[in-house]
Amino acid sequence: MYNQSKGLTFFLLAVVGIASGLAALGVWYEVFYVTADTGPETVKAISMNIGGAVATTLLTMGIMEVVMVLSRYIIEQYRKERDARMKAEGEVAGRARGIAEGRAEGREMAQKWQDWNNRRLAAEGRGEPFDEPPPPAITRED
């Protein structure tokens, strides 16, 4: 099962890390690339850029989290359906195999009884004693 506190911790760390990286990029841009601004203008521009970076990061990470949760849910549903389908198919195949084995076993036993009865009738027809025991009954090992 998905550990929600671990997921939340990862989410928050990722947001802070990405926001910090984007903020550092904004600071670098304002300090080293835009050199015509005064000190207060640079600070104002940096604070404006950081807000956008944080908002963009939160939005991006939130969308990623929703996609991950939905994909996990979809995958779990697919696996449940697949497992149920495979179990049902296995049960049907097992029953069919059992029925086929039972029929084959029944045909074999019927043939043994038929052969025994033919030998018995032939011995009676010849007037000979017939002391052969009948075939054993079907026994299940289940």
Image (spheres, grey):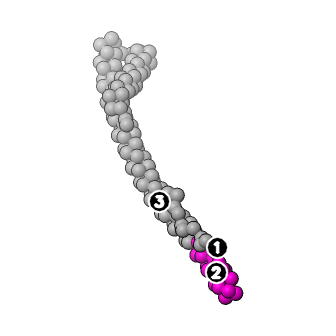
The image quadrant of residue 110 is: bottom right
Cα distance in 3D space between marks 2 and 1:
8 Å
**Kind of element beneath mark 1:** loop
Q: CA distance from mark 2 to mark 3?
A: 43 Å
Q: Position of residue 21 (x, y in %)?
A: 41, 22
Q: Earlier in the sequence, mark 1 or mark 3?
A: 3
In the shown orientation, is residue 140 left or right of residue 39? right
Mark 2 residue type: Arg
Nearest the viewer among 46 and 62 is: 62
Seen in the picture, residue 8 relative to 24 is either above or below; the reply is below
Residue 63 at x, y percent in the picture:
36, 38
- The residue that mark 2 highlights is 120
How crowded pointer 1 is (Cα within 10 Å; few <14, some 14-19, many 20+) is rated as few
Q: Which residues are magenta?
A: 107-131
Looking at the rendered structure, the kind of residue marked 3 is Glu
Q: Is residue 104 visible?
A: no
CA–CA distance in space, label 1 to label 3: 42 Å
What percent of the width, then of the height, locates residue 77? 39, 50
Question: Which corner quadrant of the image does residue 40 belong to?
Answer: top left
Q: Nearer the viewer, mark 1 or mark 3?
A: 1
Q: Mark 2–mark 3 contact, CB under 8 Å?
A: no
Q: Is residue 124 visible?
A: yes
Q: Return the residue nearer the eye: 106 or 69.
A: 106
**Circles 2, 1 touching at the beta carbon (< 8 Å):** yes
| Disc nearer the start of the sequence (2/3) | 3
User: Which residue carries the number 1 mark?
Assistant: 132
Q: Helix, strand or loop at disc 3?
A: helix
Give, as a three-letter code, the residue at label 1: Glu
**Quarter containing the N terminus:** top left
Instruction: Determine crowd level at label 2: few under 14, some 14-19, many 20+ residues with C-alpha closer than 10 A.
Output: some
Q: Which residue is mark 3?
A: 91
